[in-house]
């Protein structure tokens, strides 16, 4: 949905920002957001994979709410399937 560059960075400091992805199944809207950092050689990484912000709640097969640690694992699996690094690189290239 959006990628924001919060700190453009320079030769001595990395760029920092936040990405928000959103999905809609026709009935509900789900979103997940995280902070990222641009590292040397054009590598973009999540700042803290355990600090995702979301309105998604995961349930076990028995209908119990997953613990935050387990939910973070599930969210990370989803995030790693998204082309978010490409969107970050695109946002960064628009600064120069």
Image (cartoon, rainbow, N blue to C red):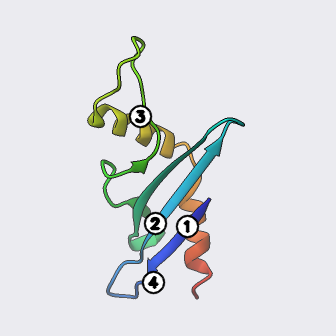
Is residue 16 placed above or below 33 in the rendered structure?
Answer: below
Q: Are marks 4 and 1 in contact (CB under 8 Å)?
A: no
Q: Residue at x 38, y 50 (%)?
A: 52
Is residue 49 placed above or below 88 in the rendered structure?
Answer: above
Q: Residue at x 62, y 81 (%)?
A: 94
Mark 4 Cα within 10 Å, few/some/many (few <14, many 20+)? some
To which residue does mark 1 refer?
Answer: 3
Mark 1 Cα within 10 Å, few/some/many (few <14, many 20+)? many
To which residue does mark 3 refer?
Answer: 74
Mark 3 element type: helix
Report whether 72 appears left or right of 32: left
Q: Earlier in the sequence, mark 2 or mark 4?
A: 4
Mark 1 element type: strand
Report whether 21 appears left or right of 33: right
Mark 2 Cα within 10 Å, few/some/many (few <14, many 20+)? some
Dot label at residue 51: none
Q: Are marks 3 and 4 in contact (CB under 8 Å)?
A: no
Q: Are marks 1 and 2 in contact (CB under 8 Å)?
A: yes
Residue 93 is situated, as x and y percent measured from the top left of the image, at 60, 79
Residue 40 is situated, as x and y percent measured from the top left of the image, at 39, 73
Cα separation between marks 4 and 1: 13 Å
48 and 65: which one is in front?
65
Cα separation between marks 2 and 4: 12 Å
64 and 21: which one is in front?
64
Q: Earlier in the sequence, mark 1 or mark 2?
A: 1
To which residue does mark 2 refer?
Answer: 18
Q: Are marks 1 and 3 in contact (CB under 8 Å)?
A: no
Dot label at residue 8: 4
């Amino acid at each position: 949905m959006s990628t924001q560059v919060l700190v453009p960075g320079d030769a001595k400091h990395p760029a920092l920002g936040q990405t928000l992805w959103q999905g809609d199944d026709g009935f509900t809207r789900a979103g997940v957001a995280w902070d990222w950092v641009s590292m040397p050689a054009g590598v973009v990484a999540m700042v803290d994979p355990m600090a995702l912000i979301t309105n998604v709640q995961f349930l076990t097969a028995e209908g119990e709410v997953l613990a935050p640690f387990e939910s973070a694992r599930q969210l990370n699996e989803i995030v790693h399937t998204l082309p978010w690094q490409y969107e970050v690189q695109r946002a960064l290239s628009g600064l120069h």
